[in-house]
Image (cartoon, rainbow, N blue to C red):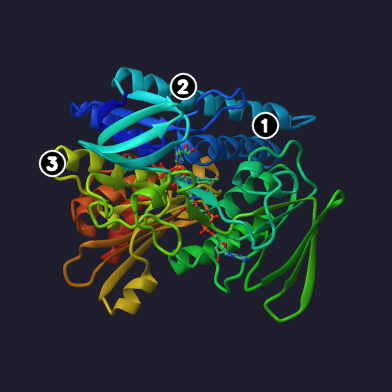
Amino acid sequence: MSLTFDVVVIGGGPGGYIAAIRAAQLGFATACIDEWKNAAGGPAPGGTCTNVGCIPSKALLQSSEYYEHAARHFTDHGIALKDLSIDVRKMLARKDQVVKQNNDGILYLFKKNKVSFFHGRGSFVKKAEGGWELAVGGESLVAKHVIVATGSNARALPGVPFDEERILSNDGALRIGAVPKRLGLIGSGVIGLEMGSVWRRLGAQVTVLEALPTFLGAVDEQIAKEAMKAFTKQGLKIELGVKVGEVKSAKSGVSVAYVDAKGGAQTLEVDKLIVSIGRMPNTTGLNAEAVGLVLDERGAIVVDDHCRTNLPGVWAVGDVVRGPMLAHKAEEEGVAVAERIAGQHGHVDFNTVPWVIYTSPEIAFVGQTEQQLKSAGRGYKAGTFPFSANGRARALGDTTGMVKILADAATDEILGVHIIGPMASELIAEAVVAMAFRASSEDIARICHAHPSLGESTKEAALAVDKRTLNF
Ligand code: FAD
Ligand code: NAI
């Protein structure tokens, strides 16, 4: 006997668990299947984001930032500390506790919203009367609608599998038991910079090898330049334009042969190596081929603008489909699909999906970069305001960076906002709201911002678009 549901979601990451909750809120009999196991073998819903991504990385970023403040910046405030030390095991245990709180929170939300939860691997069996037959453990489920939200996995260097001891993916990178003396990272993307920052702050000598000749190519060039300056000053060694060759792992550490940007043969010797060269969509065990679910050449499930796959009643969201691999993008798609199933008009605006890199200084942006506007031939005006001229930033002792606003030359509509500096992750929300409402830079310039606040820099950057800053 099969259990029948209106909606079954496969995958309990931010795309899947949010889709399930929204579907249940809309009155559908809903189930969510997730296979992630905690250390005791029990359920740990929340996916990559909760278990080995957003949440644990931010916990370690916070701990290591406190440590760096105590080690380097407290003296500026007249605070003296003796015998400062870091207990890495305790830091990791705290991180695990934060993860558990989130896992438990999701199980609670499933109960609260009457979502049936199945712990195990879900796979397609066949097209069935009234929908799709799925298997999980010994159970058979039939669903009118299936939402696939199976996420992504770390990409390994060809021929260099992760052992999570010395050659680490994001998973092992979050479990290093003691501060390594020498840490190598392949890829200066988001994970490379965030994880590199954590271990650098705690005392590791960090070298990042990046294949591309430009740093943070997707980021506004002016902001990327400022970031490179700040990270280099902190002691992150970032080598651009390299070609990574043979990687050898031994008890004593890892050696990476590479050719540098000038064509010279080099070797990097490190104790641990984190490989953070992007992620691949994950459909392992889904049995997609049995039902003819179409994947693209990268292994992503092919969907249209509404997250519909080639199969009727089968939808897919999050990292397993096209688009940025971000938790909030996955969540938005999950909500939109549940609402579309209910006959509503779920909508995701890719132009207003913000990006945040949680380094120090933080980097956050939304909309288009200056280089994108230039290459599209779009007329624009730019306004920038440095945090060094903001009273709150001075009081915080954190004045690196700026807010930059790009607005249409003719209509003044905001086309992009780029922030590097303190609390950029929080400041970007105002920009996203403004862009969602298609505000002009003048709209932000006319809005009263609390004083003293970092947000005043956003107002001043908007004033700068019209060349009339008040405090700079
Ligand atoms: P996932 O979170 O990957 O969840 C998929 C779930 O499906 C998993 O639990 C998996 O076990 C389960 N599953 C897969 N196949 C099956 C199956 N057949 N049956 C049952 N279950 C299955 N994004 C941000 O927006 N902000 C950040 O700060 C951020 N930090 C990150 C830091 C790191 C180190 C990493 C690696 C990623 C980070 N991300 C961040 C990206 C973010 O984690 C992903 O974009 C997000 O998790 C994608 O959500 P998802 O629901 O599509 O997939
Ligand atoms: P990434 O795509 O951000 O960066 C990968 C980097 O590796 C790129 O700069 C690329 O040029 C480089 N690279 C690729 N192959 C290489 C090679 N052979 N040698 C040297 N360099 C190479 O991927 P990353 O850092 O692995 O993160 C994966 C994804 O996870 C991100 O794109 C993002 O979507 C998500 N994420 C989001 C975070 C956030 O929102 N704060 C934090 C961490 C991850």
Label 1, secondary structure: give it: loop
Q: Which residue is mark 1?
A: 79
In the figure, is residue 349 to the left or right of 328? left
Q: Which residue is mark 3?
A: 344
Gap in angstroms between the C-alphas marked 1 and 2: 38 Å
Q: Residue at left 51%, top 47%?
A: 358
For badge 3, the amino acid type reads Gln
Q: Residues within 10 Å of mark 2 (few under 14, many from 20)?
A: some
Q: Quadrant of residue 59?
A: top right
In the figure, is residue 242 to the left or right of 50? right
In the rendering, at what x and y percent does residue 212 appear?
57, 71
Q: Residue at left 64%, top 51%?
A: 196
Q: Is residue 395 above or below residue 265?
A: above
- Nearer-N-terminus badge (1/2): 1
Q: Which mark is residue 222?
A: none
Q: Which residue is mark 2?
A: 104
| Residue, far left | 343
- Front-most of residues 344 and 299: 299
Q: Residues within 10 Å of mark 1 (few under 14, many from 20)?
A: few
Q: Locate the N terminus by quadrant.
A: top left
For badge 1, the amino acid type reads Ile
Q: Is residue 285 above or below residue 369?
A: above
